[in-house]
Image (spheres, grey):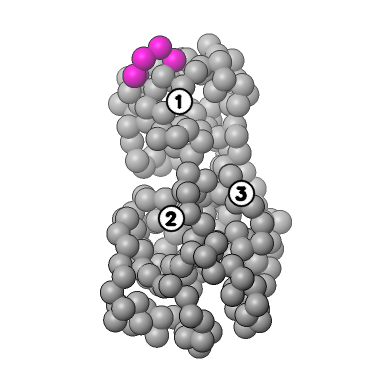
Amino acid sequence: MEKIYDKSAIADCIAKSKYHDVLDTMELDFYLIKYEKGEFVSSPFQNELLFQIVEQGSINIYFIRDDGTRYSLSNGTADYFLGDMDIFYPRNNNIYAEAAESLTCISFSVEKHREQLLSNNRFLELICCSLSAKIGAMTTMDAAPATLTERVISYMKYKCDGGILKGIEQASFHLHCSARQLQRILNQIENAGLVKKLGKGTYKLTVTEYVF
């Protein structure tokens, strides 16, 4: 991830944005963020609440349940909003956005500018359209079929800080399987080079991408 504060680069991106006529009227501390493929653009592990507009590239948005089951919510491309729900609601700890390719986003802090955002009717109209489309997509989503192996990898990637699973018993509870089943899966994916054992009951995911 790379943050860019060059004013001319920021102005150029805003000028190309579908929403430039609204953004130009807002006195916000804009900056750009560039992501590499596979990096999290938004996740519960991030400390700062950001509003981001995809300027170039694409993202995949997932809803991950505690048992590792993954729902595909959307595929965002140019002009897609991230952080729109964070303006109104507490952060959802199960939604992740991941760069599907090299990605550039126009960004600004939600917390720093919340009052201004909520008082701008034109901006709120854009948010309403964005949220309506997302809610419509959620009503038709289905869980992607997943084996226990896939759910274990998904659980480690999205639910374990730093991709490190600690405690077989606790993890097996979340994954709705027995500790013996989980240990067998961990042994298999360790042999396949997908995880590394760090200690008793502690494993680290060693792959950044896994095709489900």
Residue designated by label 1: 165
Q: Earlier in the sequence, mark 2 or mark 1?
A: 2
> What residue is rendered at 48% in x and 44% in y?
45
The span picked out in magenta is 197-201
Asked whether 36 falls inside the magenta stretch, the response is no
- The numbered mark, 2 or 3, whose residue comes first in the sequence reads 2
Label 1 close to label 3 by CB (< 8 Å): no
Which residue has dot 2 on it?
41
Disc 3 marks a residue whose amino acid type is Asn
Give neighbour class at mark 2: few <14, some 14-19, many 20+ (Cα, 10 Å).
many
- The kind of residue on which mark 1 rests is Leu
Q: Residue 143 appears in which quarter of the rendering?
A: top right
* Residue type beneath disc 2: Val
Report if residue 114 is visible in the image. Answer: yes
Q: Please, what is the dominant secondary structure of the magenta stretch?
A: strand
State the residue in front, 186 or 117: 117
Q: Position of residue 95 (x, y in %)?
A: 56, 49
Q: Decide if residue 196 is on the left or right side of residue 46.
A: left
Q: Is residue 72 left or right of residue 164?
A: right
The crowding category of the residue bearing disc 3, from other C-alpha atoms within 10 Å (few below 14, some 14 to 19, many at least 20), is few
**Label 3: element kind:** loop
Task: Left or right? Give the position of 8 relative to 182.
Answer: left
- Residue at 47% in and 49% down: 47
Q: CA distance from mark 2 to mark 1?
A: 22 Å
Q: For residue 83, which numbered disc appears in the image?
A: none
The correct choice, above or below, for 200 with respect to 51 in the image is above
